[in-house]
Amino acid sequence: MIAADNHQGRRGTPVLTLQGMGKDYGPSTVLDGVSLDLRAGECLALTGENGAGKSTLSKMLCGLVTPSRGIMQLNGRAFAPKSRAEAEALGVRMVLQELGMVPTLTVAENLLLDRLPQRWGWLDRDALAKAAHAQLAKMGLQHIDPFTPVGQLGIGMQQMVEIARNLRDGNRVLVLDEPTAMLTAKEIEHLFEQIDLMKAQGVALVYVSHRLEELQRVSERVAVLRDGRLVDVLPMQGLSEPELVERMVGHAVESLDTKPRRKAGSVLLRAQGLRRGKLVQGVDVELRAGEVLGVAGLVGAGRTELLRLLYGADKADAGSIELTGLAQGLSTCSVTPNWSSPMQATRAGIALVTEDRKAQGLLLSQSIRVNTSLSHMGSVSGAGWLKPAVESDLARRMVKRLRIRAHNAEQPVGTLSGGNQQKVIFARWLHRDCPIVLLDEPTRGVDVGARADLYAELDAMTAQGKALMVVSSDLRELMELCDRISVMHDGRIVATFERGQWTTQALLEAAFGDASRPGEPVKEQL
Ligand SMILES: Nc1ncnc2c1ncn2[C@@H]1O[C@H](COP(=O)(O)OP(=O)(O)OP(=O)(O)O)[C@@H](O)[C@H]1O
């Protein structure tokens, strides 16, 4: 439990003040003239388009980015941390968008790395387990074995541990950068409880997210960054979602929600009786030309596993996958029971836009150009030789088309903002031009304006007769994009709805596996 000690000020008093903060990378200015105060007991929402500078500003507070100019003061004293450890020692911490833990160390070691309990000069395992357990319990994670290596946990669970690690006594400022991108509704509730607790104890919070409903739930004020400049600081109360979007993007964003169902063409892919252990238990799927099939379900329902089977990333224990779209340029083949490799799937015309952009998708040290052309080297080479001019031209076109915010196409992908990295994955498959496109959480971390751009791209793909399948935890996204939505529960498809038939309630009931949950609060984020 965090004590209301004298570290933390009275509600509303400034804890951390920023004056004229700026950051340049070489000739590019990515942040300029940002002046703000963070107040005790308050949560400040920080929002803006992908690449607007939110993570850069957040990392400055926490010693991870050195400002090029500007002055910060913590409780009236000069504050210029040179490292994360220095900021943390002064009570300023950050939950990073990219996971900051050491995967080979245990959960307990990661949680208490800077204060490992010792006895007679040896690590005190009992004390470590006890302290780790207490820390985990704050996020409802008391069931985790503290001696599990972090790398063995799923990505959502790693994020929960990363949050738990930063819930420390003596926190003055806590920055949360896209903390819920990998979390379930229940886990998000745990986080929100902790946020309320910290506010009551006088901690100043910064919450960075593209999920506007979350910003409205947790924060008292909202700061909007555009192109590295602070354009607004407003009270959150009374601010509607469309108003907030307009402030962020600079214009209103249209919803596709009211569009009629697309006209489906012939079946391009038919899977029957697909099985893999308990994860996927006898699933039938048909993907048709010109339509988008959505897949909803709780985390662990088998959605990602189903996509991986269709793409050949995992082997099915049983079942068949048949490609039937000869007219669309697909080869007709039947794979029973195993579709054996992603390369085979890609050659046959299937793309997978992955959910875990760092582990499965991108070469972070390589440029946008290299990452874009990677899915189809044949189109940028001839007689076994790479054609650099063709490759560069392709990358430049993709940067423009998807409005990827970058200095140029040679910028290493690891230095792009999170949302812009997601766009590069998308660019890679857009360029490959596959007739069947599988997308797993395609807009995670992507801002509302850019999301609308990506939806428009998907819409154009269906108009060309492609078949799309989208897994998303965001029901609003599925309802906006899809013509049909199948709901998975415990490895099975338990319901399929046509556009016009679904309601949020019906989708949630199917996702929870029954219709007998009267009075359950409805959450749009699964
Ligand atoms: N090391 C670096 N070298 C060059 N440019 C960088 C570096 N780090 C960040 N940038 C640039 O700074 C800009 C701001 O990035 P930042 O990550 O702060 O954006 P963001 O608002 O957090 O975006 P998102 O919503 O996508 O997470 C981007 O254009 C990014 O490419």
Image: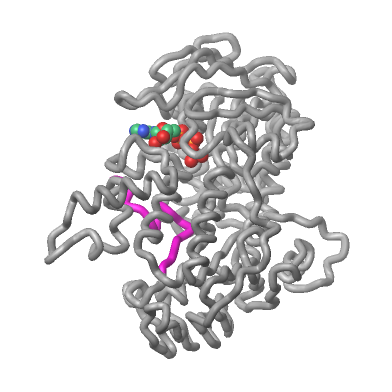
Q: Quadrant of ligand 1?
A: top left
Q: Residue 237 in the image: state x and y as whole percent.
A: 77, 30
Measuring from the top left, give residue 397's x and y in whole percent.
34, 48
For residue 127: magenta?
A: no
Residue 83 position within the rendered picture, expressed as x and y whole percent measured from the top left: 41, 26
- In this rendered view, identify the residue nearer to me: 12 or 116: 12
Q: How is the image coloured?
A: one colour
Is residue 322 positioned above or below 236 on the image?
below
In percent of width and height, residue 6 lies at 68, 18
Apparent side of residue 305 relative to residue 366 in the rendered image (left or right): right
Between 331 and 518, the one lying in front of the other is: 331
Image quadrant assignment for residue 66: top left
Task: Give me the residue at 54% from left, 60% from top.
Answer: 459
Magenta residues, start to end: 351-365
Q: Residue furthest right?
A: 519
Image vertical order of residue 78 relative to residue 422, above or below: above
